Image (cartoon, grey):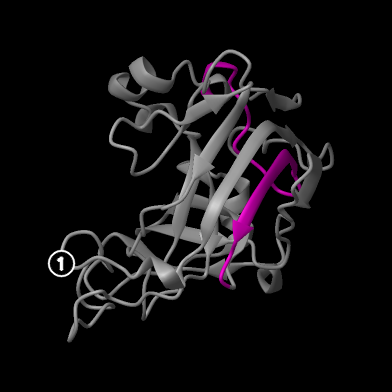
Amino acid sequence: MDRTTYVETFDNGPRGWTAWGTGNMVPKIQDGAIISRSPWRVDPNHCSPGGGYLHLLTYIITNPLLFSEEMAAKVGPNRFIEEGKDRNLTNARITVRMRGEVDAKGAKLVLLAQADVPGTRTNWVMTGQTFNITPEWSDQTITLVPDPSQWLCLGSRHDLTHVYGYGDIVEVLKNVDVDLILVFHPLKIVSLKEGVDVDYMRTHRDYEPDYRYLPSGYVMFDTITIEYDIEYPPEAPGS
């Protein structure tokens, strides 16, 4: 596995980075940067009793088995996969050059790491380190430390426990084999329809959320860099 620094500038398109809820998966590129604007779709897969609702701004698939030909035709090539980047991200540093203007309504822009562990797929948001959105360009860096106090496992909504569950962040960071996502979390969900149990029903299918309670604005991602910690090389085969 390649542990040299991964850098994506988006000067040549999405390069595997994908949008969610746009209909065609392709993020909008403006002046060599991904630009993500509200209103953002609401992901209800981890609502109560799980860790909460999400806005997914952009993500990169880390596993070639999950990066379909359809995705490649629209947002490929996926350089993380093509260059064989190591999925052991223990203590990796992720730097995002970004700018934006957002009324966050209490939400934070955070990284979500998703991985398959024995028996389930588990999602973790790094609540201990967040990205600061500023009107001017700035470089924001987080370090993926294997410290459970800095992470929140999202678990699952009531009817997806057969898909999503809990795990160990130490093991997850050793093999982030699904994706990395930039998300807004947590979100306050209020239905436009009266009498709706929002945690039982599904957003955008059974009801529409009241966007007055949700983040609004835009965020631009100019460069995303992943630097590996040389103290955490890949485990030797058979270890």
Q: Residue at x 72, y 33 (%)?
A: 225
Name the quadrant containing residue 150: bottom right
| In this picture, residue 10 sits left or right of residue 43 | right
Q: Is residue 98 visible?
A: yes
Q: Pointer 1: what residue?
A: 206
In this orientation, which residue lies closer to the viewer: 73 or 150? 73
For residue 46, what is the image quadrant? bottom left
Q: Is residue 118 magenta?
A: no
- Residue displayed at 73% across by 62% down: 129
Tag 1's secondary structure? loop
Image x and y of residue 204, in percent: 23, 59
Q: Residues within 10 Å of mark 1 (few under 14, many from 20)?
A: few
Region of the chain picked out in magenta, as a range: 81-105
**Is 182 placed left or right of 73 in the picture?**
right
Give percent across and percent down for residue 133. 71, 53
Q: Relative to residue 40, is residue 127 drawn left or right?
A: right
Instruction: Report the residue at 48% width, 29% height from top.
Output: 28
The reply, left or right, for residue 201 in relation to residue 175 is left
Residue 145 rendering spot, x and y as whole percentages: 74, 57
Q: Position of residue 126 (x, y in %)?
A: 64, 61
